[in-house]
Image (cartoon, grey):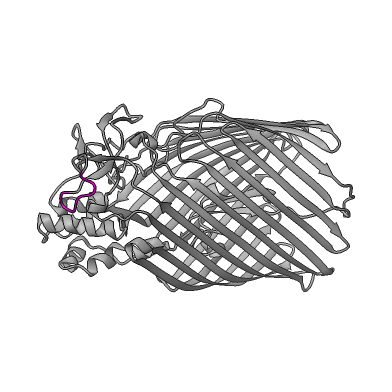
Amino acid sequence: MDEIGGIFDFGNLATTGIESVETYRGPDSSLYGADAASGVVQFRTPRGFTNNPILTFNGDLGNFHSARNELDLAGGMNRLDYYAAYSWLQTSNALPMDEYHQGAAVGNFGWQPTANIVLRGTTHYIVSAVGVPNAWNFYGIADDRKQSDQNLYTSGTLEYQMTPDFHNRVEYGATRKREQSMQWYPAGICEPINTCNLSYPAAGNYYGEDVTIRGANGYQVVGQALLNYSTGNGSVYPNRLDLVSNRDQVLYQGDYHFTPHITALAGFHYENERGVEREPAYALNDAVERDNYDYLAEVTGDFKSRLFYTLGGSLEHYSLFGVQTTPRFGVSYYAIKPRHGVFNGTRFSFNFAEGVREPTVADQSGSLYTFLESQTGGATTIAQLHIPQLEAPTSRTWEGGLQQAFLGERLFFHLNLFHNEFGRQIETVGVGLIPQLLPGLTSAQQQQLEAQLNNDGAFSLAINSEDFRAMGIEATVDGGLGRSFHYKAGYTYLDAVVQHSFSSDNQALLGGYEPTLDGIPIGIYSPLVGARPFRRPPNSGFLSVSYAGKQWTVLSTMAFASRSDDSTFLGYADINQGNSLLLPNRDLDFGYANIDFGGSYQWLKHLAIYGQAENLLSDQHIAPIGYPSLPFTFRLGLRISVGRGSAN
């Protein structure tokens, strides 16, 4: 479902047609390909289970002019089952120029012609449009931008149980993603006044209001931040950026049970990817096509239902970066098997996996290596700074832990230790720094190059320059009281450290040093060596509590996080094109507590009332610095079901 390069925007995902969500931890490239560098999120689509059709309508209203309607139909007949749904959502959100609209259509149809053959087809089509006001707390002015998306996900599956021990699965999947980003005019205040229509170099630019930017670390700065470049400095208005990401893939997997204790799986996966990045105003039209395939194998088994193991891997060929291998191994051992009693079911586990990720279309077309290679003096910079051609980011995970059951498996305690290594991560080098990579240019030539990059829409270029390790501990408690009450709580401590970064490794070679505030070095676009990766809080936790009765269902979820490192990314963006709007990276983002509460009441057999309240504390610091979070929201609605059926 993701775009080329593993990016997936959950903001455009509709909840319509999603029955459940599962998360698979750790790299899973050996089973799911290059995009599964650190985990996999799986969505399940509902299917019909009743002999007669059931029609369900959900409609709700909320604050910020929010409204949502959903209609779905599900049922079955003989060996056929079907599910179809459509929904529409709209809200104004809390900021100017930030309205959101979304429509979604879903279909899931299955047919079982014989006892050992199942055919299934699933489609999700989602369209959305949203305003993009930019970082409001940095500017105090909403930018005039809009983003539209049209995403189609389709799959067809054939499952064939050839023998009781031999199961086969063939699947075709297609993804069609379209994104349009439109800006009609340069919002902001022209500084110096009445200069934005002049020619370069006399032209000014558009800035935000005079604002105070405060970090969670206690530091603050005051000033106007660059919001939009003027036409005199190379920008064109209106301008539109189109992104296209298409994928067609075929997967075969076969699993064979040699004994009740040993199962082997083998498969083949092929995908054809096409991507386009197009911006007519800047004559940008980059297209890529990739053909990737991989062979996978895995063995799972157990010994006397006490020792369980998994050993697998894949041999992968990618047209962009060649051949990769991604092994995975896991083992778990029951020191004490589950049984009745207060203390029972002690299990130890260990897992190891490696993964890779494809660069995105924007990464490939905006490669720093490719850009420098085309510039006079660029070859010298490439050699001096050891700038590589774009490669695949990698990940490696080691983890081990303990699961302990209590009270006859009514209460579980999990403790897990992990050590992860992330290599060749892609960083972006901002347009303000790129001219300095060509020191042979005069000051005037560097300014002209920056204007040219702005004119081409190349606001940053990509390079594999970041390595970091992440280690820590996770603890969760999962249990319930009776059949109706369930709770789950967890805590994670993360110790993550950057080992290499473009800023730290190359700044001195450029003849300068990182920007500072009160003598504290600052990473503008990426963290410095020895610091924490951006936006990864060292302490985080969650708590969920639910009750499900005959008529009442109640759920409350809480998420907590400590402060984390970040950047304002306002390098070379103050009124003098300097760095006075940067703040120290350490603990720049605020910690937060996000509490949600919801429930439903089955009033009549075919009528239910439901409600949802989010961000009960109206915490404005859940999002990164510069972006105010949506405050307290609520919605209240009705669910009406029509139809009668019995389970198949």
Q: Quadrant of residue 224?
A: top left
Q: Nearer the viewer, residue 491 or 58?
A: 58
- Image quarter of the C terminus: bottom right
Counting labels gives 0
Res 449 visible: yes
Q: Residue at x 44, y 45 (%)?
A: 132
Q: Residue at x 36, y 56 (%)?
A: 426
Q: Nearer the viewer, residue 214 or 212?
A: 212
Q: Quadrant of residue 259?
A: bottom right
Q: Residue at x 57, y 58 (%)?
A: 151
- Residue 289 lies, with reference to residue 80, above or below; the image says below
Rendered location of residue 219, percent (x, y): 28, 28
Horizontal side of 76 relative to 453 (left or right) equals: right
Horizontal side of 215 relative to 646 (left or right) equals: left
Res 486 visible: no
- Residue 417 is a magenta residue: no
* Magenta region, main secondary structure: loop
Horizontal side of 36 relative to 72 (left or right) equals: left
- Residue 348 lies, with reference to residue 284, above or below; the image says above
Q: Which residues are magenta?
A: 195-202
- Residue 260 lies, with reference to residue 602, above or below; the image says below
Rendered location of residue 82, percent (x, y): 78, 58
Rendered location of residue 518, percent (x, y): 19, 31
Q: Nearer the viewer, residue 631 or 387?
A: 631
